Image (cartoon, grey):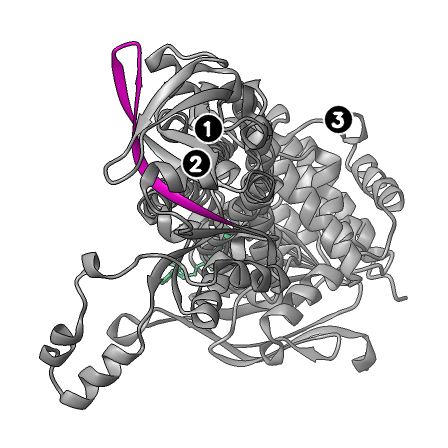
Amino acid sequence: MTPLATIKTISFIALRQLWERKLLNGIAVGGVTLGVLVLIAMNGIMLGFSDKFTSAILKISPHVILFDTELRPVSPLLERYMQTPVAAQIAHESPTDRQVRIKRPYEIVNALRQVPEVEAAAPSLAGMVLLEFGGKTKSVDLRGIEVAAQDLVTPIHQYVKSGRLRDLDTSHDSIALGAGIAQDLGLKVGDSVRAAAPGGKPLDLLVVAIFEAEVPPIDKTRGYTTLRTAQTLLGRPDAIGRIEIRLWDPADAIRVNDSLERMFGYDGESWKETNANFLAIFAMQDMIVGFVVGAILLVGGFGILAIQIMIVLQKQRDIAILRSVGLRRSDILRIFLMQGVIISLVGGLLGDGLGKVAIYYLGQLPVKAEGLVKTDTFLVKEDPAFYVYGIGFALLVGVIASLIPAYRGSRVEPVEVLRGQIG
Amino acid sequence: MDRSDDVLVETRNLTRALGDGAAQQTILHDISLSFDRGQFVALTGASGSGKSTLLYLLGALDRQSGGEVWIEGVEMGALDDDDRAAFRNERLGFVFQFHFLLPEFSALENVIIPMMRRGNWSRSEAEDRGYEALRMLDLHELYFRKPGQLSGGQQQRVSIARAVANEPSLILADEPTGNLDSKNAEGVFQVFANLASEGRCTVVMVTHDADFARRANRQVRLKDGRVIEDSTQHGPTSVGRA
Ligand SMILES: Nc1ncnc2c1ncn2[C@@H]1O[C@H](COP(=O)(O)OP(=O)(O)OP(=O)(O)O)[C@@H](O)[C@H]1O
Ligand SMILES: [Mg+2]
């Protein structure tokens, strides 16, 4: 009656019966393998894409931006007091008649640098300018920056392909341009380009650097000048329009953004809000992948269920023999459960192995894409958790699927089988 | 012959009904029997008289509708399902009317599975015992074969080896010689007769063979679920307690 003897007997029987039905059980294993393979491959693709996208965003975009829009707690109060929004509407200034800027920006920047979650902060001014070169014009999203401070927030210098970012500071009236703009206008480092914006003073700017972050939306629209140059160009002397912030952990962005808004009274936006559309698409894709993988694993589970039910029905006689020579109901139950676990474990391991191979080959697949992100190969990313999930889900499916057959098998009454044979 | 301590099996007013409601039919009526340790009992009767049913009740495979079955001081009806399985495993050996072997396992493996479950012996000890049991039935040379590679008679003898290898105190055999030629049938009869005469176990054997029935220690004849004849006799096997 030692439990060890029980385990030995049960596994002896379970393994042999599995082995003797290689084809059927192989099919069951195949179902699980397929489910796990798809789980890993799909998740690899999804993670690869969203990861690439996220890292592309975070490469050259700040984690949190404070804008020059003041949050006005007064209006809602007034609104509440009057019981109607009309009064608030009357009190509301139209955008044109107020000076849009962050007040005392350097105090805020210094205060921000003291916030524990904040790694770096830099003031800047953004605006659209028109570049003209060789008869071609292009509108550019211009950022006037403090070069050293900004580079700590968004490491632009890493992506400079030609020229030097620091030359922005040394040569007067200079600009760093995205590779896409440079290509469109046919610009090289050393060329001089005409820049103009409504309300500002047109300038001839020397191209000192060309960068390529491999994020097409940025490479094709972004230009950097010093803060002073941008203020002149845009006609907003001394104005700071935004403060860009880098956090130690980008995952904190939403929470930190909320507390910064409360702290400084300016409207802020985290990168997750800025890119909410895309992130929502990823969340939806994850859900779809979940459904697909769930469905395939479910089918794998039904494979185990169907095959085991069939075996239980076929093996009534064998169960009767085992019961009559002294195996307990629980032994029979455990034999079938063990078979389910082994099928799913083997399926899970095979799926993990094939999944790894699939991830490798998918990653080699040449794909030319230049949309949100730029890539030469299929985007996949491996995460060790995939393999744990793969085995985990396989086991879950295997155990659940074999519960019914195992229970049925354990309910077989030996006498009924024996009588049936005789009658 | 007052040997109450030598009584191995005793049934008291054992009754078994099958089916329910109007279709209910009593298959065994008030069977009161007792078998001594070391007795070789032949159970006879026409087809449908209830022999197999009685055997299943003696073997703790079936549950009685009334009465009691005592084996070595334990009442089978009082045991739960697991205890009955354990009891079968440790004290009983079955040989079924149709040789019942597990097709995936070799002759030897079929023989040792009950011993493995019992856990009293190591795997190699169990294999030695199983091999000995097969030798007793002259099958040791075929120990590695699967049931599909054995003749019907050989399969029947493997199932007998399985029943005896575990050293049960009671062997229940349902027409074990039914499918055997006369030479093999005689061999099987001798195996049971020897086990019983050595006092190692009690054998209850269902048989349609009048000769075997006569040569057993005792013959119990059933008709329509009742004992109609119970005769102690001296066959070629001595009773073993002279
Ligand atoms: N499931 C059942 N429901 C109702 N009656 C049954 C059932 N199984 C068997 N019987 C009846 O029980 C009676 C006893 O059957 P049993 O198998 O014990 O006879 P037996 O003496 O072993 O016959 P045989 O020599 O043919 O093996 C028979 O009349 C049979 O028809
Ligand atoms: Mg019968």
Residue where numbered disc 1 is placed: A173
Q: Distance between the residues labelled 3 and 1?
A: 99 Å
Q: Tell me which residue sits at (38%, 13%) in the image.
A: A183
Residue A3 % position (x, y):
76, 61
Lower sequence index among marks 2 and 1: 1
Residue where numbered disc 2 is placed: A229
Residue A219 % position (x, y):
41, 26
Query: Main SS type for the magenta part?
Result: strand
| Residue A131 on the magenta segment | yes
Residue where numbered disc 3 is placed: B142
Q: Do labels 3 and 1 share a chain?
A: no
Q: Tell me which residue sits at (43%, 19%) in the image.
A: A179
Relative to A63, does residue B231 appear above or below in the rendering?
Answer: below
Picture quadrant where residue A293 is located:
top left
The amino acid marked with disc number 1 is: Asp
* Residue range of the region highlighted in magenta in the rendering: A123-139
Q: Distance between the residues labelled 2 and 3?
A: 99 Å
Q: Residues within 10 Å of mark 3 (few under 14, many from 20)?
A: some
The amino acid marked with disc number 3 is: Leu
